[in-house]
Image (cartoon, rainbow, N blue to C red):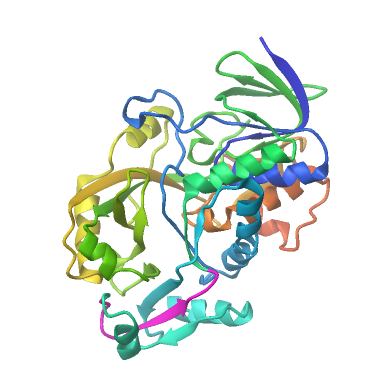
Amino acid sequence: MTTASYDYIVIGKGLMGAAAARHLATERQSVAVIGPDEPSHRATHEGLFGSHYDEGRITRILDPDPIWARLAQRSLDRYRNIEAQSGIAFYHEVGHLMVGPEPQVETDYMACVQRVAQDLNVGCDTLADAAIAEQFPHLAFAPGSMAMYQPHTAGHVSPRSQVRAQVAAAQQQGVTVIPEIVQRVDATASAVAITTATGQVFHGQNVLVATGGFSNAQALLPQPLEIDVYARTIVLLELGPDDVSRLQGMPSIIYKPRDPAGHCYILPPIDYPDGRYYLKIGGYPQEHTLGSLEALQNWFRGTGSVEAARHLEANLHRVVPGLRPVAVHSDSCVTTSTPTGQIYADRIGDGRIGVLVGGNGSAAKSADEIGRIGALMIAHEEWVYDIDAHHFRARFAAAASSSQTR
């Protein structure tokens, strides 16, 4: 049995956890991040999974929520530095197009996006029906739509490569990376003891739990969080050379028509590790929730919902007409939602354990700043971030005493 001690331990080596470990390293104290690597064969894997096993996530500042927009803006500002430090590229600046109905009242989706864009001074163009069709002739949206086009500081990231870049940069800063699955977290009088599946024990003076959709299923915390883990399906259309050429210059897209069944996000052609180009779509209305460890594992081993895949493929052909795909594939992932719509970044119990959970389907683009929030939260006795702590306070599935959060 191996034992080691650290000032800070991050449990979870995904988008948030890897970023938090890198930011914690700037505190110039000993830091470790514990979490398994991506499995070689998902269909037969018996352990844990992550939702970053993919090559395409939308990144942009445009957002109807001012907090999420600010987190994205701050993260985007650091992408190139992380790439340079790690030597791993993950960001593709192809622009972003956000489309919805012309707003009728100030609370409509596109009105909120416009207001946030103005407040954060986001460089973007506002387009009406005819202008959308003229600038993006290969796309089709419902009559009466408006679009906000952010040509710069937007596009898409490879979440898989982003995690690799964060881990590599963290290692350069002295972070110890432990590719293990954590089975137990026990707070002792002197430290927090972490036991892994192979029997190794690590002690941390402060521990940050960033285990995403597995946070409750692994039962690492003294009390379950109030979160919903949704099963999500995505579709990948394999493109031939003609479609790849025709769609060159296509931005990432979020489309929110009046009919919620048409809500979707679309990634432009992306070169995947198999050397083929795929057009990705997601955003099918929330599917069933996944509560148990077994349910999560079974979902990740599969390829998603057949019904959802058909729905998404039909939506993709409506928005990008004329596609002639070589093949169609579906895949599974999960989103972890909080009732507040914001991440949980909070200390629990006596304060030595913190949580950084709840991407709400929006975390990939903002993960670096989310990691920074988690690092600042666990490294300082008082809240020092410039967005108030109440936005990020954790909620628990059962009634908790006031001493459990700060």
Q: Position of residue 101 (x, y in %)?
A: 35, 81
Q: Position of residue 91 (x, y in %)?
A: 51, 58
Work out which quarter of the rendered image holds the N terminus and state it: top right
In this view, the residue in front, 401 or 367, is 367
Q: What residue is shown at x 72% (from left), y 42% (from top)?
A: 347
In this view, the residue in front, 18 or 291, is 18
Q: Does residue 30 sit above or below 112 in this rendering? A: above
Q: Is residue 108 visible?
A: no
Q: Is residue 123 left or right of residue 288?
A: right
Q: Quadrant of residue 404?
A: top right
In this view, the residue in front, 116 or 198, is 198
In this view, the residue in front, 329 or 197, is 329
Q: Position of residue 378 (x, y in %)?
A: 75, 43
240 drawn magenta: no
Q: What residue is shown at x 40% (from left), y 70% (from top)?
A: 251
Q: Which residues are magenta?
A: 140-153
Q: Does residue 314 sit above or below 22 in this rendering? A: below
Q: What residue is shown at x 40% (from left), y 23% (from top)?
A: 46
Total number of numbered labels? 0
